[in-house]
Image (cartoon, rainbow, N blue to C red):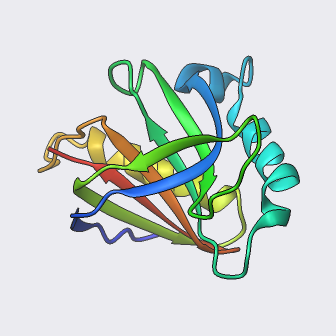
Amino acid sequence: MDQQVTKINIDNPTILFGLKVRTCNMNEMSGEGAKIAGLWQQFYTDIAPKLTPSSQVYGVYTHYESDVTGEFDVYACTDLQVTSSEIEQTTLATGNYLRFSGKGAMPQTVIDVWGQVWQYFSNEQCPHIRAYKTDYEFYKNSDEVEVFISVE
């Protein structure tokens, strides 16, 4: 899959509502202690039925401990203000982002796009530096996702 990367600037913060876990890539890739799949399962069971046709769905990665090796928070969330004792609020921060995109069956497509992100930033000639502030997935529809990575 050829990847076109687009640099964008987000000027206005967006408030989102959803469920949160704290995890790290090592746990997610090994399967031991993996939390992200369960987070999305709970989101689609508890929150998705409350969404309207115009509601937008996001996966937000924030509060990075360090880099790809450290812990971070993951939110499965929406722009619709939903209420429940488990709902937490997060913000899509303003700043510079690179946009990667993919189309196909989920969750494999979003996994593949993240693979492209890691490959892009591991290239020695990469002209961008990850900021490790707020990264997010925007699910445009059931088979299309955009992944936004914060850059310096």
Q: Nearer the viewer, residue 14 or 3?
A: 14
Q: Where's residue 44, x and y in %?
A: 81, 55
For the point 43% across and 18% down, the residue is 70
Left or right of residue 49: residue 118: left
Q: Where's residue 41, x and y in %?
A: 82, 46
How many discs appear?
A: 0
Q: Residue furthest bottom?
A: 53
Left or right of residue 39: residue 90: left
For the point 43% across and 53% down, the residue is 116
Left or right of residue 91: residue 137: right
For the point 50% across and 57% down, the residue is 137
Is residue 14 shown above or below 42? below
Q: Where's residue 76, x and y in %?
A: 64, 47
To which quarter of the image does residue 79 belong? Answer: bottom right
Q: Where's residue 86, x and y in %?
A: 74, 35
Q: Nearer the viewer, residue 8 or 13?
A: 13
Is residue 64 shown above or below 20? above
Is residue 138 shown above or below 116? below
Is residue 77 shown above or below 11? above
Quadrant holding the C terminus: top left
To which quarter of the image does residue 130 belong? Answer: top left
